[in-house]
Amino acid sequence: MRFLLSLALLALPFAAHAACEGRDLRPDLTAQEQGELQQALKDFPFPEGNHWIARKDKTVLHLIGTLHINDPRMDAVVERLKPTLSQADAFYFEVTQDAMATFEQNLAHDPSPVIITSGPTLIELMSEEDWAALSAGLAERGIPSWMGAKMRPWFLSMMLSVPPCISEDPDAKYGMDARLTDLATENGIPQHSLERIDDLMAIFDSHPIEEQVQSLVRMAGALEASEDQLATMADAYLEEKHGQILQLARLQGLDASGLDPQVFEEEWNGFEQKLLIDRNNDWMDHILDIQDQVAVIAIGAGHLGDDHGLLNQLHQAGYTLTRAPF
C-alpha cells in the first residue's frame, strides 16, 4: 500500500546503501514450486491484467492495478495510458496524496499512531532472542534498536518489508499511483480517497498489542523482504501477473517463516482478511456509488484478482469487464 510505504520511508534514513540490484527469482523455481504456483492459480479469478474496463449503463470504470514502489519502466506505461485516462471525470485512489501529506504533517506533532508512547516497549513484550533477530533487521535499514523498540508491531513489520537498498532512492515511493496522481493533477481531474486513514489505522490496532507482537514474531521471517523479492515483484507486475505475485509471496513466505503450514496459513489468512478482503469490501461500497461518469480506480494490483478482488465483485454486480492495454 502506498500509504504504508510512505510511512515506512519516513522512518528510513538515507544511508549509503547500494542501489537495488535484485534479480527475478522465478526462473530459479523448482519443478515442484512451479507446480504449486500453477495449482494455486488454477481457480484464481482474474489473475492477470493491470488495466480493466468495467461498464454498466452509463458508468465506465478504468481499474488500474498499481505498484507503490518506483520503477523507471512505469514511465512508458503512463505514456500509453495518458490519452485514455486524461479524459476521465474523476480519479479514485486508496488514499490521495493530499490526505497522506496531511497525516504525515500531523504525525510530526503526534506520533502515537505508529509509535508506542506509553506502556511496555517491544523489548519488554518479546523474548531477548526474538528482539535480537528483529533489531538486526532494523539495523540493516539504519534504524537503531531503541527507536525500533517503540514502533507499533504493524509498523515494524512494514519497516522489515522494505529492502535496505530502498533507502538510497529518494524517489522510492514514486510508484504507479504517484504517477497517476500527477496525471490527474496536470489535467485538473478531481481526486478522491476510497478509505480514511483513521479507518486504516484502526485495522492494525484491532487486536491487543500482545497479540500483534506474537504475530510479528511468528511471521518475521516471511515479512522481511530482499532485493530479489523486490525485483521479482516488479517484473511480475510489469508482466501484469498480479495473481502470481500474491501466490508466490504466500509460497515463499511459508518457506521463509519456518512455521508449521497450518500455523502459517492462519497467520497469512489473517493478514489477507484485514489488508485485502475487508478493505476490498469497504471500497466496493464507494465504487458502486459511482454513477454516470468515467472514473479511474487506481489501487494496488493485489486488490484486483481472486474471489474477493474488485474485478470479481464488479462482475458479480453486473458490470461487463474487458481487459484493456496497459
Image: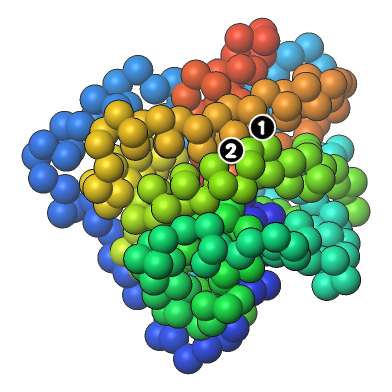
Identify the residue shown where x is 59% and y is 34%.
Answer: 274
The secondary structure type at the circle numbered 2 is: helix
- Residue 170 location, x and y as percent? 61, 79
Q: Is residue 127 above or below residue 266?
A: below
Residue 25 on image: x %, y %: 24, 56
Task: Report the residue marked by disc 1.
Answer: 279
Q: How many marks?
A: 2
Q: Secondary structure at mark 1?
A: helix
Q: Is 110 left, or right, of 241 in this rendering? A: right
- Residue 193 visible (yes or no): no
Camera-side residue of 164 and 202: 202
Seen in the image, is 246 located left or right of residue 31? right
Residue at mark 2: 275
Q: Nearer the viewer, residue 38 or 181?
A: 38
Vertical arrangement, residue 196 with respect to residue 144, above or below: above
**Mark 2 residue type:** Leu
Q: Nearer the viewer, residue 212 or 92?
A: 212
Q: Quadrant of residue 144?
A: bottom right
Say how the picture is coloured: rainbow
Q: The residue under label 1 is which amino acid type? A: Arg
**Residue 229 at least partly seen:** yes
Q: Residues within 10 Å of mark 2 (few under 14, many from 20)?
A: some
At x 16% / y 48%, what residue is drawn?
Answer: 29
Please identify the residue farthest to the bottom as the structure is shown: 16
Residue 99 drawn at (x, y percent)? 85, 55
- Label pair 1/2, CB-CB below 8 angstroms: yes
37 lies above or below 164: above
Q: CA distance from mark 1 to mark 2?
A: 6 Å
Quadrant of the rendered image containing residue 164: bottom left
Tell me if mark 1 has few (under 14), some (14-19) or many (20+) residues whose alpha carbon lies within 10 angstroms of its own.
many
Left or right? Give the position of 68 relative to 216.
Answer: right
